Image (tube, rainbow, N blue to C red):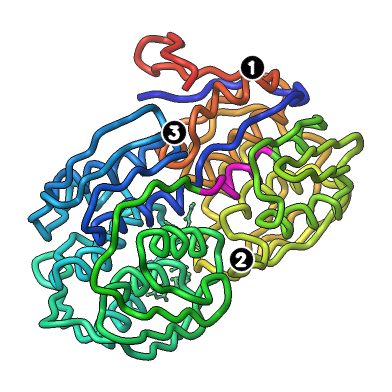
């Protein structure tokens, strides 16, 4: 088993380059199945969720040709299967996007229920409601979700909850359906706009992505395209918070500042100095963070995927902060780990009351999910001395070359193999 060993207490300084967005990549890769020609996808992050999506595409019969580390050419024409197996689906939440993509391509899809981070119950009822409204019949049998349709026809769907996954899945299924589909109460995340831009670049007719109402006029063919994925908003936010939490001074490069507004607003509130440029943001912190309250919400609200990292910063704030989780039922499982490092956090249902302590102490901790793992890395960078972070396969799902990027910023972090006592494997 691999783990990160961090010798913390050093301010991060320098420039970090942000990779392509995980949550856009895992939607765009299945969407290639809707194309009638090969596509080239650029700016893919080198993370295990992208490898899992590419494996799923090849298991369906698509031909993947790597062009360089962040670019692949995908020929979906030979894909003749409609089944994504349990082994492939279990590793990532976004495997559910193969339902919408395969349904849109073949009017038939069968996949094992998606895996991904454990935040309590993760239903897909709104996805299914959308597929059924488009004319599909969906059954769950022998541990597989099976969706089939004679033909998909445009319809109006009102989502009962703002769901990123349901919005994306319905867009995928509706792109080649007959007639007009309207999704109301749609999610507005940057990766939804990126998916719409990708599909439109292949000849789809999608309007309103980024607003609460998305209109999709079905087309019968999609052409090949070359498309570059947007920068990762959450990777950028994680380095921004790490810079502030270590009293550092970091230029976060290759970002879309518009996507980071809610994170910037909260960093300003805790006392960080922020300079925004066209494609980069500088975060500098010179004093103990001030307390601040946060409530996570769908975009453009403060992202739930930044909640554990920001709560870690607030654990050393001057005063008491309240963090309220407005998206997931159970996203405070990491708190137990932070308290091992001396944080004073009381969780009551969907809120955490964080009483700032003077410092965090180093400790062995676990990464309980992807963003919780990122939070533990930040905590390790803050605490003076040696912190080890275990179960890092969660972190590998979403952060490209984390140790390398942090080392470039002056951190002392190594990926080691647990079995061969602190043998450095690679800084990846
Ligand atoms: N929900 C339902 N029914 C559904 C779908 C969702 O009740 O059919 C509820 C969920 O239980 C949750 C809320 O709606 O309470 C929002 O869930 P959503 O569907 O938006 O989440 P998701 O699509 O499963 C994506 C991201 C998550 C991120 C959430 C919220 C991807 C691959 N995953 O998940 O990202 O937390 O949106 O922004 O895009 C991460 O990157 O670390 C991550 C977990």
Neighbourhood count class around disc 2 (C-alpha, 10 Å): few under 14, some 14–19, many 20 upward: many
Neighbourhood count class around disc 1 (C-alpha, 10 Å): few under 14, some 14–19, many 20 upward: some
Q: Please report the bounds of the magenta region as a residue range.
A: 230-239
Residue that carries the numbered disc 1 in the rendered image: 412
Tell me residue 376's x, y (percent): 59, 37
Tell me residue 94's x, y (percent): 35, 56
User: Can you see residue 369?
Assistant: no
As drawn, 354 above or below 404 = below
Element type where label 3 sits in the image: loop
Tell me residue 132's x, y (percent): 24, 85
Residue that carries the numbered disc 2 in the rendered image: 325
Residue under the image location 15 percent in, 73 percent down: 107
Q: Is 101 part of what is drawn in magenta?
A: no
Residue under the image location 60 percent in, 21 percent down: 6
Residue under the image location 44 percent in, 88 percent down: 158
**Quadrant (top left, top right, bottom left, bottom right) of the N terminus:** top left
Element type where label 1 sits in the image: strand
Relative placement, left or right, of 5 versus 88 is right
Residue that carries the numbered disc 3 in the rendered image: 392
- Whether ligand 1 has any atom under 8 Å from the Cβ at mark 1 is answered as no
Q: CA distance from mark 1 to mark 3?
A: 17 Å
Q: Main secondary structure of the magenta part?
A: helix
Whether the residues at callouts 3 and 2 have beta carbons within 8 Å, the answer is no
User: Can you see residue 344?
Assistant: yes
As drawn, 186 above or below 345 = below
Pick the front one: 156 or 366: 156
Relative placement, left or right, of 148 versus 39 is left
Q: CA distance from mark 2 to mark 1?
A: 32 Å
Residue 83 disc label: none
Q: Reading the chain from its start, which is encountered first: label 3 or label 2? A: 2
- Whether ligand 1 has any atom under 8 Å from the Cβ at mark 2 is answered as no
As drawn, 120 above or below 420 = below
């Amino acid at each position: 088993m691999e783990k990160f060993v961090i010798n913390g207490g050093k301010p991060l300084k320098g420039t970090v380059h942000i990779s392509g967005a995980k949550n856009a990549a895992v939607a765009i890769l299945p969407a290639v199945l809707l194309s009638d020609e090969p596509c080239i996808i650029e700016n893919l992050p080198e993370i295990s969720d992208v490898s899992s999506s590419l494996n799923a595409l090849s298991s369906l019969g698509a031909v993947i040709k790597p062009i360089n580390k962040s670019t692949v050419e995908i020929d979906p024409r030979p894909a003749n299967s409609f089944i994504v197996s349990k082994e492939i689906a279990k590793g990532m939440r976004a495997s559910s996007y193969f339902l919408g993509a395969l349904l849109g391509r073949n009017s038939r899809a069968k996949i094992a229920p998606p895996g991904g981070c454990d935040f309590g119950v993760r239903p897909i009822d709104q996805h299914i409601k959308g597929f059924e409204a488009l004319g599909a019949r969906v059954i769950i049998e022998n541990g597989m979700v099976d969706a089939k349709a004679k033909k998909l026809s445009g319809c109006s769907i009102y989502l009962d909850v703002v769901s990123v996954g349901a919005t994306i899945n319905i867009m995928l299924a509706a792109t080649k359906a007959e007639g007009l589909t309207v999704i109301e109460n749609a999610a507005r995340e940057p990766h939804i706009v990126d998916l719409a831009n990708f599909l439109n670049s292949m000849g789809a007719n999608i309007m309103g992505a980024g607003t609460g109402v998305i209109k999709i006029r079905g087309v019968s063919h999609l052409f090949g395209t070359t498309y570059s994925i947007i920068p990762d908003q959450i990777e950028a936010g994680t380095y921004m918070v790490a810079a502030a939490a270590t009293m550092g001074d970091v230029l976060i490069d290759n970002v879309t500042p518009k996507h980071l507004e809610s994170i910037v607003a909260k960093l300003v509130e805790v006392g960080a100095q922020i300079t925004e440029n066209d494609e980069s943001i500088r975060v500098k912190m010179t004093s103990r963070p001030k307390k601040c309250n946060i409530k996570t919400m769908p975009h453009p609200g403060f992202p739930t995927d930044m909640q554990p990292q920001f709560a870690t910063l607030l654990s050393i704030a001057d005063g008491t902060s309240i963090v309220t989780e407005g998206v997931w039922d159970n996203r405070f499982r990491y708190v137990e780990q932070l308290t091992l490092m001396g944080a004073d956090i009381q969780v009551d249902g969907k809120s955490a009351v964080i009483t700032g302590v003077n410092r965090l102490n180093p400790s062995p901790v676990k990464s309980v999910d992807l963003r919780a793992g990122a939070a533990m890395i930040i905590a390790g960078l803050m605490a003076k001395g040696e912190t080890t972070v275990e179960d890092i396969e969660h972190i590998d799902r979403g952060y490209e070359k984390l140790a390398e990027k942090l080392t470039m910023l002056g951190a002392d972090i190594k990926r080691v193999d647990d079995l061969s006592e602190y043998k450095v494997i690679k800084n990846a």
